[in-house]
Amino acid sequence: MKALQVSKVTKSYGEVPVLKGVSFGLAAGERVALMGPSGSGKSTLLNCIGGIDRSDEGTITIEEQSLEGLDENELCRLRRESVSTIFQFFHLLPTLSARENIEFPLQLAGLEGAEREERVAQLIDEVGLSHRADAMPDELSGGEMQRVAIARALSIRPHLILADEPTGNLDTVTGESILDLLAELSDAHGIAMVLVTHSESVTRICQRTLRMQDGVILEEIATAG
């Protein structure tokens, strides 16, 4: 079963076309890098896949569920249960500790306390931050904040992760360690990923690279990931 299928998706803002019939698919556990210059439509495509924006035409299907048939409440439920996003600037809640940031989506999902605690403890350990679990975001380094963000994304056990420039706000060494962590966790949990990036280094953890320009996919390249 495919984790994601995008078919002939178009999107315009006013009279300006941003996506022009984009199509691609993603198997369960597969990682795809989405590259292209600013204004090529990468972030708009990611927002459409995540249900933040609505496409004008075409279909987006996540695990056989078409987004076009979902209302706003159903889209919110999909994001709570199946699709997570990792951002360039982390988006941690500043008044919550690392542990509490990871736990927050599970509280929204109504998970019982004991199961929440067990899952959070496992995730903190997986991302190597057990010793920083009670630290606040302003006490963490950029790499540590991104590790918390990754653990938070994993907390709902998603089928698909959308990563928007996940290493764009990190130094080279830290960024490489975050890429290794994403690949390791994606493989361990069978999670498909779409990684929007300007960095060629991201492609090393992906099976394919899609290059976009002016709202279309120009080429698809098989990579070593």
Image (cartoon, rainbow, N blue to C red):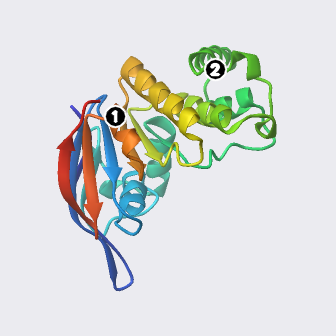
User: Which residue is rendered at x = 33% and y = 44% of the image?
Assistant: 33
How packed is label 2: few (under 14 Cα within 10 Å), some, or many (20 or more)? many
- 134 or 203: nearer the viewer: 203
- Residue 222 in percent (x, y) is at 19, 39
Residue type pointed to by label 2: Ile
Name the disc covering residue 124, or none.
2
How packed is label 1: few (under 14 Cα within 10 Å), some, or many (20 or more)? some
Q: Is residue 110 left or right of residue 19?
A: right
Per the image, the residue denoted by label 1 is 204
- Residue 173 in percent (x, y) is at 55, 33
Residue 155 vs 67, above or below: the answer is above
For marks 1 and 2 on the same chain, the one whose residue lies earlier in the sequence: 2
C-alpha separation, residue under disc 1 versus residue under disc 2: 25 Å
User: Which residue is rendered at x = 69% and y = 34% of the image?
Assistant: 101
User: Which residue is rendered at x = 37% and y = 37% of the image?
Assistant: 193
Residue 55 vs 154, above or below: the answer is below
- Residue 217 in percent (x, y) is at 22, 59
Residue type pointed to by label 1: Arg
Name the disc covering residue 166, or none.
none
Q: Is residue 64 visible?
A: no
Q: Is residue 7 left or right of residue 212?
A: left
User: Which residue is rendered at x = 42% and y = 59% of the image?
Assistant: 43
- 207 or 25: nearer the viewer: 207
Point out the residue furthest to the bottom here: 15
Q: Is residue 222 left or right of residue 158?
A: left
Residue 48 vs 223, above or below: the answer is below
Point out the residue furthest to the front here: 172
- 212 or 92: nearer the viewer: 212
Quadrant housing residue 111: top right
Mark 1 secondary-structure assignment: helix
